Image: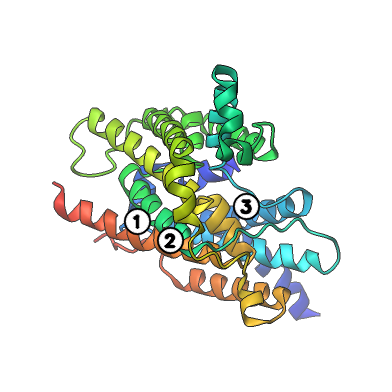
Amino acid sequence: MGTAAQVQPAAATAVKRLPPWASLGIIFGLVSAASILTWGPIGVSGTYPRFIGAILRRIDPAYATANPYLEKMGSLLKPESFLVLGLLIGGFLAARVWRVAKPAIERVHAAEHSTRARYMNSFIGGFLIIFGARIAGGCTSGHIISGITQGALSGFVFAAAVFAVGIGTAKLIAARGN
Amino acid sequence: MGVLIQRVGASSPMMILRNLRLENLTVIKFMATTIAVGAMVAYGLSAFVPMHFDIKPLYLVGVAVGGVIFGVGFAVGGYCPGTCVVGAGEGRKDAFFTIAGGIIGALAFTLVFETVITPLVKMTDFGKVTVASALGVSPIATAMVLGVVFLFVVWKLPTDVTRKR
């Protein structure tokens, strides 16, 4: 029939014309579902305190076993740690395969007048995102993506706070900086 | 996952800030698409096979406070705990500083956990609630509706908000 023959190529060209955020988002969604199928939802931030735990267990085992948070987070040998390792490898491979020249430091905020300023903001940012993520119990992957995917109210609350404050802060910095 | 993040631009702090300033919505749309597809597929599969869902408990004050702190760090640094690892893999120097800050942050959190965090966090714990459980409706149906709504919104929103003249 004419219509069936027309629908097929139209669908194929539609998929090919998908913007990157859509095609990559679909793939990531499938990866996320596959993760829930095999071991559990994806997450990242827990790996940071587990890393601390692994180090402290070597340096001061008495403290490490007495600290309830380290005991709660457990061993570094969890699926999540391998996912984080994969992020590192993935970033490396993607940059090489798609032959991106080593990205220069981006001047993320107009007020960052030196690379030292960028490094300081990066460090402060890094401290706050992990500290905040552990208070909340998750980060963009664990709370926002995995949480909302599963319909968890905690994910919605975290996302609302992150975006409200993140957008406000970003716009404030832009308005004040020059 | 690392490849996907790098390709969509999420490991670029410049791109993250453009999203947070609402100038470009690529990363937000990427996340929404991921959520929509993940929700529909995961809950769709749950009708046939057991799934390893893991709902994070809603201890309201802790989740909200954590989100606020995270939001500031996200806007100042331009990275999240995952994207800075991808960035480090790419060779971004500021990503390494972010990871360093994150490790110190994890250490600080570990040290103050018992005294400061536990009481703060355990206030108003509503448990592992989901939209479906709160409304008393089918989780699979909720996931499908959520997925469709997210995809529709994402399709309708512009990606490049600041039109170049």
Q: Secondary structure at mark 2?
A: helix
Which residue is painted at 46% across and 46% down in the image?
A: B10
Distance from Cα at disc 2 to Cα at disc 1: 13 Å
In this rendering, the label closer to the viewer, 1 or 3: 1
Q: Which residue was labeled with disc 3?
A: A28
Measuring from the top left, give residue B80's x and y in whole percent: 45, 44
Measuring from the top left, give residue A126's x and y in whole percent: 39, 38
Between residues A28 and B111, which one lies in front from this camera angle?
Answer: B111
Distance from Cα at disc 1 to Cα at disc 3: 23 Å
On the image, which quarter does residue A152 sit in?
bottom right
Q: Secondary structure at mark 3?
A: helix
Measuring from the top left, give residue A133's x and y in whole percent: 47, 48
**Mark earlier in primary sequence (1, 3):** 3
Q: Residues within 10 Å of mark 3 (few under 14, many from 20)?
A: many
Q: Which residue was labeled with disc 1?
A: A166
Q: Residues within 10 Å of mark 1 (few under 14, many from 20)?
A: many
Which residue is painted at 13% across and 46% down in the image?
A: A178
Compared to residue B150, the image places residue B102 above or below, namely above
On the image, which quarter does residue A63 sit in?
top right
**Whether residue A150 is visible:** yes
Residues flagged by tags 2 and 1 on a common chain = no
Quadrant (top left/top right/bottom left/bottom right) for the N terminus of chain A: bottom right
Between residues B14 and B120, which one lies in front from this camera angle?
Answer: B120
On the image, which quarter does residue B163 sit in?
bottom left
Viewed as shown, does residue A83 lie left or right of A158?
A: right
Q: Amino acid at mark 2?
A: Ala
Residues flagged by tags 3 and 2 on a common chain = no
Q: Which residue was labeled with disc 2?
A: B64
